[in-house]
Image (tube, grey):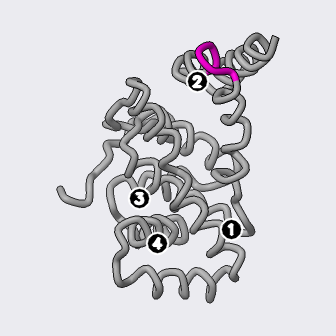
Amino acid sequence: MMRWLLNSGLRRFARQKGYDTTYMQEVTDAWPGAGLRYLFLPALTRLTGPAPDIWAGAILASVLDGDCGSCAQLVCDDAVAMGVDPGRLAACLRRDFEAAGAVGLGYLFAEAAIEGAADADALRDEIIRQHGPRAAIAAAYAAASGRVYPVLKRGLGHGAACRRIRLGGEDHPVVRSDA
């Protein structure tokens, strides 16, 4: 019964979001208790705080660090639905962080936190100065948790490299930091 309920919910999510939940359904079929754990992940990944733009940049950087095209598209779609400007998300994809504004600040913070870079503290301090401590906490959660789905997918044999993200009816290539 638990398998059926979980898979029913996953199929509904797939239809609503245009997202392939095959990997989640396979886990649920093999181990319903592990499939049930998916229900708890949004508590981490969707902690947006008071500044959705900061969260959107941080979660996007984290998802892209996991290198998952469908996860990055889902994050962008959710951010736009929350009111984040798609142009600012697109600016992050091309690494134009000045044009990305607060979305770019969140993105740069997440990259620095993931890499253990020296400027992570300064970027966190800037987030706190502009948006308060809750925004910095949300960005830290996003930086840490955004990689969960891509890494799970890759570990389960369903990972996909991110090439383009659709925003505002246009495809945008993802520019990597080492490019």
Amino acid type at image mark 2: Met
Picture disc at residue 141: none
Q: How crowded is mark 2: few (under 14 residues within 10 Å), some or many (20 or more)?
A: many
Amino acid type at image mark 1: Ala
Q: How crowded is mark 4: few (under 14 residues within 10 Å), some or many (20 or more)?
A: many
Residue at 68% across, 36% down: 37
Q: How crowded is mark 3: few (under 14 residues within 10 Å), some or many (20 or more)?
A: many
Q: In this view, does 88 lie above or below 71?
A: below
Residue at mark 4 to residue at mark 2: CA–CA distance: 30 Å
Q: Are marks 2 and 1 in contact (CB under 8 Å)?
A: no
Provide the residue designation for mark 2: 24
Residue at 69% across, 45% down: 42
Amino acid type at image mark 3: Cys
Give the mark, 3 or 1, whose residue is nearer the N terminus. 1
Provide the residue designation for mark 4: 109
Residue at 45% across, 31% down: 153
Provide the residue designation for mark 1: 51
The majority secondary structure of the magenta stretch comes to helix
Image coordinates of residue 34 in percent, x first then y, are 64, 29
Q: In this view, does 47 lie above or below 41?
A: below
Q: Is residue 37 shown left or right of residue 153?
A: right
Image coordinates of residue 146 in percent, x first then y, are 53, 51
Image coordinates of residue 148 in percent, x first then y, are 52, 45
Give the mark, 2 or 1, whose residue is nearer the N terminus. 2
Which residue is more in the foreground, 120 or 165? 120
Look at the image and tell me in which quarter the N terminus lies: top right
Residue at mark 3 to residue at mark 4: CA–CA distance: 12 Å
Q: Do the residues labelled 3 and 4 touch (CB within 8 Å)?
A: no
Provide the residue designation for mark 3: 92
What stretch of residues is rendered in magenta? 28-32
